[in-house]
Amino acid sequence: MPASDHVDLNGFIEGVKRRNPGQSEFVQAVTEVAEDIFDFIGDKVQYHEAQILRRIAEPDRVVSFRVCWQDDNGNIRVQRGWRVQNNNSIGPYKGGIRFHPSVTESVLKFLAFEQTFKNALTGLPMGGGKGGANFNPKGKSVNEIMRFCQSFMTELYRHIGADIDVPAGDIGVGGREIGFMFGQYKRITNNFTGVLTGKGLEWGGSLIRTEATGYGAVYFLQNMLKSRGQDVAGKVAVISGSGNVATHAAEKIVALGGKVVTLSDSEGFVHDPDGITQDKIDWVKTHKTHRRGRISDYATEFKSATFHGGGARPWGVPCDVALPCATQNELNGEEARTLLKNGCTAVAEGANMPTDLDGVHVFKAARILYAPGKASNAGGVAVSGLEMSQNSARMSWKEEELQTMLKDIMSGIHDRCLEYGRSADGHVDYVKGANIAGFKKVADAMLAFGVV
């Protein structure tokens, strides 16, 4: 290998920082992957000569656009929208759309980068992308949300397509928002095609898509525990978040015989030592989705619970397993140490990059069962990929078939993590396994295409 092509890990990360100033989330995501990939590619000249990691860490394109819309008072409002198309070496770009005031180019670049590896791990032909806007749907009327979605799609439509880029939902974007965007896409293009996933069942959606991310995270946790002769049954679980992913993860934990004791939102968390049963989960779903309520109300409804406010997070509650299902960087190094001190032996991420780098290093050093989001929360995009297949074939699968396929996909991801993450003493580094397995699939496709 020419000397000029060789750079150490620190040199590589410094280069990423220089090229992406102020984009801390993106640099964090690249660093976490590069820490494992550098050892793997150390003696593989082909990856160095083709600068594969450098190319994966440079999005194919970042599209930024203005989104103008009118509120109910007749005021003109201006937001910024993006679509980051990171890599399409193994299939069309695939990844969600996020509407939240915290959305920045850095956040979307990190999500698209992670999505590239996540999608590769599913075994389905999907590349990585992500999009969104710094629009806050909270407090907006249905008509305001509809007008924003239509304006957003008026620009986005020219950059997507069933064989080009297939967005889905994410934070702030559920079935309602997908419906508004799909309606505008159809109006503009006069084309009914599978250009978005997460659609309603009446117009091309897939069964279990809503449940898939939360269920998939628990299926992955189940696989990890099984590898050590354990099961979910009897385990006490701490879960963050109270949205789609968190409630369905809780639902599956309860169904498998575990006990969920926390849920949270941006204001704080509730601790219910009696256990958050299925009836209580159903109440949370209705309260958050239809009443747009806060998780603090849970403690008023159910006297067995206490609410911890001020943005408190649930990682100090003793547990056997933890599932961070809210958002990025919600679990830091100190909180990771607290989880370990209180007996936590397994962590399965339901959100994207919810653990910061310090926390990742703490979990890896402790050699607990620790699944990164790119592996354990891939169930959602897996079923989105299956929705794409159903749309292309103009057919739909039954729920039982989809549940079986989801379990098989999560089991397959677990097996790929074992292949590249198992050490000589039998310990499995799931972060390393996921990073290398995802990288190798994308990298080998990139090598086949030449320098493009």
Image (cartoon, grey):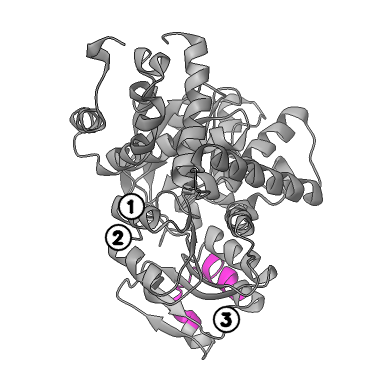
Left or right: 362 in relation to 289: left
Instruction: Residue 142: give x, y in percent of width and height.
Output: 50, 56
The quarter of the displayed image where residue 362 is located: bottom left
Residue 330 visible in the snapshot: yes
Q: Which residue type does callout 3 highlight?
A: Gly
Residue 67 visible in the snapshot: no
Q: Do the residues labelled 1 and 3 touch (CB within 8 Å)?
A: no
Q: Do the residues labelled 3 and 2 touch (CB within 8 Å)?
A: no
Instruction: Residue 40: give x, y in percent of width and height.
Output: 41, 30
Q: Which residue is found at the position 53% from the left and 48% from the top? A: 426
Residue pointed to by mark 3: 275
Quarter the N terminus occupies? top left
Q: Distance between the residues labelled 1 and 3?
A: 31 Å
Q: How crowded is mark 3: few (under 14 residues within 10 Å), some or many (20 or more)?
A: some
Q: Which residue is found at the position 44% from the left and 73% from the top? A: 343
Counting residues from the start of the chain, the first of labels 1 and 3 encountered is 3
* Stretch of the chain drawn in magenta: 283-298
Q: Which residue type does callout 1 highlight?
A: His
Residue pointed to by mark 1: 361
Quarter the C terminus occupies? top left
Q: Are marks 1 and 2 in contact (CB under 8 Å)?
A: yes
